[in-house]
Image (cartoon, coloured by chain):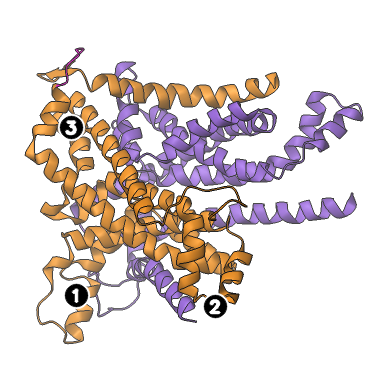
Amino acid sequence: MRMGGLLAAPAVLYMVVFFVVPSLILFVYSFWTAASYRIVPDFVFSNYLNSLMSPLFWKVTINAILIGLVTASITLVLAVPVGYYLVYVSRSQVILYLILITWFSSYLVRIYAWRTLLGTSGVLNTILIQAGIVDTPVGVFLFSRFAVAITLIHIYLPFCILLVVSSLSEIKKDLVDAARDLGASPLGAFFRVIAPNAANGLVGAFMLTFVMVAGDYVTPQMLGGSSGQTTGLLIADQFRKTGNWPLGAAQAFLMFLVSIAIYFAVMGLGRATGLVVKRRPIGKAGG
Amino acid sequence: MVLKLVVWSILAFLLMPLVIIVLFSFHASPSLSFPFAGFSLRWYAEVLGNAQLGSALLKSLTVAGFTALITLVLGAAASLAWLRLGHRGRALLEVLCLTPIALPGLFVGVSLLVLFAQARVQLSTVTIVISHVVLALPILIVAMRARLALFDRSLEEASRDLGASQMQTFGKVTLPLIAPTLIASAILAFAVSFDEFVVTSFVAGTETTLPMYIWSMMRRTVTPLINAISTLALVFSVAILFIAWLIGHLRRRSAVAGRTVS
């Protein structure tokens, strides 16, 4: 036990110094003020209040939430069949490694790939023109919410699939087989047996994807054009361009609160629709 | 059958952009669209002749190497601790590891920037490595945790009962058993660091890593040169993944062999 503490100490210390402490400093910063490029220790709520009263902040935050919700939903819907296939139908190593390859292929490269695919002289447009479907290049592919969404889905889908696989792995195939024997269709078996049992894991996968997507500011910046302003970009710019770090810190924590609020909203929605149920011990009613 | 079709369409969606990137890296003309004007290696020749790119690559390799090394040492100790810790110790480690994974890189990046500014630390290669370890260490510990659930502590006890010292037990029993997984995880830490962009952009100061160089090119223009760099990065990632898989695979085989002997 003492030995264990000693061995864990370096890693714990490292994470405390370089993760916990910085987060706390950032929190303290959010109450400070910035005056003419200098940061002054203070204790004011103006960073929070100013952000909450700024129409721009709400506009970009709603944009980030919308992009996050739509993208995370589509990502989960795409991830579930792949996860289901990998867990219950075939433990195909080929598919697993193809997913891992996309997961480990560079983040920026994938953004760049969609940029070349969707551009006015890009692959998609040239194919559409040659097929005679359109006469002039479609401009809205690039620099639109569509471009941002499809790229984010592409970037985070492998991650989401791996989360879905791990949450489905906890549910025994016997349960699915039993449901099928009792006459449930594959979709019925999924919605009535797997989904309720895996609900916590699936909600977890959705939320993690949401947080990653809503916080991703590079993709909207590269592919979103004027519609690509998100809270993440606003925060990043406070730390890079304008230099009002306390304001950026406050906005980072507001974004964090928004994510928590959305988590509770999703859980509440799940309970209301009966998809998420509190796990009861086996033997008692329900299950 | 319908499911299989759906799964393969989704995989096609995942792979198609990568295939297009690789295809156009061999394009004879600077255009990035069809019709395809024939194959050429001119962009790869340009990559090799680019000195800035070379120094960015070297920087990335250095950072990733140090990140993997530090992560390996800290993570190895934490993994050994994991076997010995009680519930509360494990819970603490878990919270410390899972929280940074569940936060966007932006949050980690700006909080580290604020820390370095407050401590008056000059942004440099060192701050990049420090930051990358924050991202890689949790991933290594989480990956190790899954493997260590299968670890049989009675092997250590047997070794002690047979008269081996604590150090001998560690060197001859524990370490050989967990080493392959540790090395595979360290390779993943290398891959994470090599590709990291968001956090790096806050803590790099004037240093340029490969992703930051690619970013600066991407912002300016769209050229098959970026495709060639991307293809090389892709090949590199796949190679890393393959090595990690190979080590894991050998481990499984040796574990099976060990079981038949005993």
Quadrant housing residue B154: top right
Does B131 lie within the magenta span? no
Q: Position of residue A263 (x, y in %)?
A: 34, 44
Chain of the residue under label 3: A
State the mark number for residue A183.
2
- Mark in front: 1 vs 3: 3
Q: Circle 1 sits on which residue?
A: A125
Is residue A42 highlighted in magenta? Answer: yes
* Front: mark 1 or 2: 2
Q: Residue B191 location in percent, x, y?
A: 48, 47
- Circle count: 3
Q: CA distance from mark 1 to mark 2?
A: 47 Å
Q: Amino acid at mark 1?
A: Asn
- Quarter of the image for residue A236 reads top left
| Image coordinates for residue B101, horizontal then vertical, percent | 43, 40
**Quadrant occupied by the C terminus of chain A:** bottom right
Q: According to the image, label 3 marks what residue? A: A238
- The chain whose colour is orange is A
Residue B204 drawn above or below residue A122? above
Circle 1 packing at 10 Å, graded few (<14), some (14-19), many (20+), is: many
SS state under label 3: helix
Shown in purple, the chain is B
Report the predominant secondary structure element of the magenta stretch.
loop
> Are the residues flagged by discs 2 and 3 from a single subunit?
yes
Measured in 3D between alpha carbons, the distance from the residue under mark 2 to the one under mark 3, in whole angstroms, is 58 Å
